[in-house]
């Protein structure tokens, strides 16, 4: 059986874009998920401040077994356990919390904590993080990414999140970003699955152009 880490690395190699579905409702999870996966996305995140996030994660993980599905805005070790019980495989946080990262690693899940400084980045890696969410990207310019890339191990995945659109992906990628978390520019409450699918295709095209 392929390990989660191998799956994660494979998906990041193919298309390193994380679909952040903040505000997703369980009743729309299947349609929205289908639109995004059909566009080429392999990594889906449901932030825990969405309506019934664990139910949406359960639906998505069962419907798309070849994708990696997980949760964002994870702040406690208990949430990590609840996410795994719902079928989630990714643990993504807006910040660096030792307990969250360690629980995810101990349970065999992919840990992507949020960091904004070299100190946080190296601390996260020491705890076993599998990649680093650079958040908020509005405060972390491509120049900052370049500086962080210069001192971090070359294999470390740097994923800017926050304010990412098709207009600024190339600049971040040239500076050393590995991939991106795409939020409101991809999905927002009330946006139709068809419209989400069109946005997803635009991001896939933009990535390949970089």
Image (cartoon, helix red, strand yellow):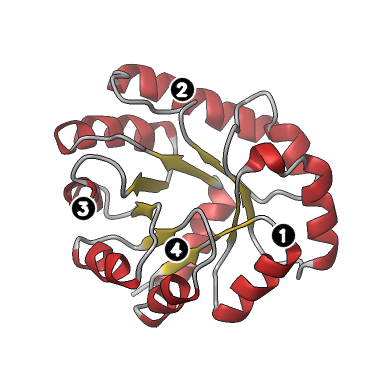
Residue count near mark 1 (Cα–Cα under 10 Å), binned few <14, some 14–19, many ≥20 = some
Q: Earlier in the sequence, mark 3 or mark 2?
A: 3
- Viewer-nearest residue: 54 or 95: 95
Answer above or below: position of 105 versus 179. below
* Residue identifier under label 2: 199
Say few, some or many: other residues with alpha carbon within 10 Å of mark 3 (under 14 / 14 to 19 / 20 or more).
many
Q: Which mark is residue 54?
A: 3
Q: Is residue 159 left or right of residue 30?
A: right
Query: Which of the two discs, 3 and 4, labels the residue nearer the N terminus?
Result: 4
Quarter of the figure that contains the N terminus:
bottom left
Q: Is residue 116 left or right of residue 95?
A: right
Tell me the residue that label 4 is attached to.
7
Question: First in sequence: mark 2 or mark 4?
Answer: 4
Separation of disc 3 and disc 2 at Cα?
A: 25 Å
Q: Disc 1 and disc 2: Cα gap in Å?
A: 31 Å
Q: Is residue 80 visible?
A: yes
């Amino acid at each position: 059986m392929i390990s989660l880490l191998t799956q994660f690395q494979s998906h990041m190699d193919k298309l390193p874009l994380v679909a952040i579905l903040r505000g997703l409702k369980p009743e729309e999870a299947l349609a929205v998920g289908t639109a995004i996966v059909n566009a080429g996305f392999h990594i889906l995140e449901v932030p825990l401040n969405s309506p019934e996030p664990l139910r949406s994660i359960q639906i998505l993980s069962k419907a798309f077994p070849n994708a990696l599905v997980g949760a964002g805005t994870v702040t406690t070790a208990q949430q990590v356990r609840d996410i795994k019980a719902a079928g989630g495989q990714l643990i993504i946080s807006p910040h660096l919390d030792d307990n969250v990262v360690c629980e995810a690693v101990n349970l065999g899940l992919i840990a992507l904590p949020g960091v904004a400084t070299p100190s946080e980045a190296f601390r996260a890696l020491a705890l076993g993080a599998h990649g680093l969410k650079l958040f908020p990207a509005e405060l972390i310019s491509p120049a900052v990414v370049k500086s962080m890339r210069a001192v971090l191990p070359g294999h470390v995945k740097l994923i800017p999140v926050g304010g990412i659109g098709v207009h600024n992906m190339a600049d971040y990628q040239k500076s050393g970003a590995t991939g991106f978390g795409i939020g409101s520019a991809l999905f927002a409450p009330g946006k139709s699955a068809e419209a989400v699918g069109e946005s997803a295709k635009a991001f896939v095209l933009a990535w390949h152009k970089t």
